[in-house]
Amino acid sequence: MKTRFSLFAALIAASAAVATFAQEIPYREYEPLDPYEPVVSGDLKLSGTYQYWKDPANLDYRMAGNPDENWKLNWKFMDPPFNQAVHGGHFAVDRGEKLFRQLNARGRFASCLGVRNHNLQNLRAGYPRWRADLKHVAGLEEVIEYCGGKQGRVLQNGSYDNSSLSIYLASLGNGQPINIDVASGPMKAAYERGRRLFHTKAGAFNFACSSCHTHNIGKRLRGNVITTIYGDAAHYPVYRTQYMLQSLHLRFTECNLDTRTQPLLPGSQPYTDLEVFVTALTNGYPISVPAERDW
């Protein structure tokens, strides 16, 4: 009798453990995890549009004026010098410069950001990166918030002032190719988490990022045509005509809202992982800000 009772109790305990485990790890569906190359030319194998937008100085603007073909340019025709004198991204750059001068009066802000030898030009091209002081991989906007806080300045990730500083610092590196190393260590781990998240279905529509930006490139989504994710990180933060200035993490929140998915806070680890993945797919492409997008 005792043996039967012990076996019965063990089965109940095992069932409870399985049930608890199932509650802790929610069910997820995934799009097929396509192979990606962490360099912008990897798009040759994905969308076939890289040939049209790989050289920012020699875009075919006849395609830009054709609504059936402009998506093939991956909207790079709205990067500088497009509309150079009039859009709100330029005002944001000016605001960022003013803030930077205030915060960096003694050089502490630049040092905290990770600037070496006063070389601000290469700063944006190397983010996201591992930060030993934060003990995790962080994007530039998260570090701006952190470094501002050390001086008693509130620069919330996703706020206008935070993004203004980010776009100003990015503008100093215009033309510098994005260059983050995801070959090993924490950066590789973040890249792989971001790649998996990019393929994770969620929300009321059960969409993943890859549902659109990998498996439906060139197809219409309402009034827009879906473009490749390769090369996108180079123009963030971006001036959006309906939302003013938008960081990459705010773009993630907008995509979540559009697909009826609960968004996360800018600076959260999943968004940073996704930022690492998207930025790695821009490796080798030059920074180009302030850019403008109308959707």
Image: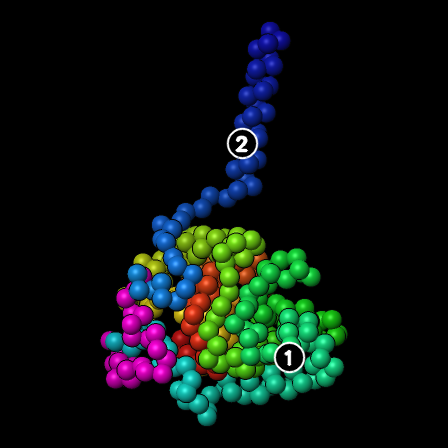
Tell me which amino acid carries mark 1: His
On whether residue 146 falls in the magenta region, the answer is no
**Which segment is the magenta one?**
46-68
**Pick the front one: 125 or 149:** 125
Q: How many marks?
A: 2
Disc number at residue 118? 1
Say above or below: 198 vs 70: above
- Quadrant in which residue 59 is drawn: bottom left
Q: Quadrant of the C terminus?
A: bottom left
Dot 1 and dot 2 residues touching (CB under 8 Å): no
Nearest to viewer (mark 1 / mark 2)? 1
Disc number at residue 248? none
- Quadrant in which residue 135 is drawn: bottom right
Residue 277 visible in image: yes
Q: Residue at x 55, y 65 (%)?
A: 128
Say above or below: 22 vs 195: above
Q: Which residue is mark 2?
A: 18
Residue 190 position in % (x across, y down):
53, 55
**Pick the front one: 85 or 183:** 183
Residue 176 position in % (x across, y down):
48, 77
Answer with left or right where residue 72 lies relative to residue 30. Answer: left
Q: Residues within 10 Å of mark 2 (few under 14, many from 20)?
A: few
Q: Residue at x 74, y 75 (%)?
A: 151
Q: Residue at x 52, y 54 (%)?
A: 184
Residue 108 position in % (x across, y down):
72, 76
Tell me which amino acid carries mark 2: Val
Q: Quadrant of the N terminus?
A: top right
Residue 242 visible in image: no
Q: Residue at x 70, y 84 (%)?
A: 102
Q: Residue furthest front?
A: 117
Q: Secondary structure at mark 1?
A: loop
> Which mark sits nearer the N-terminus, 1 or 2?
2
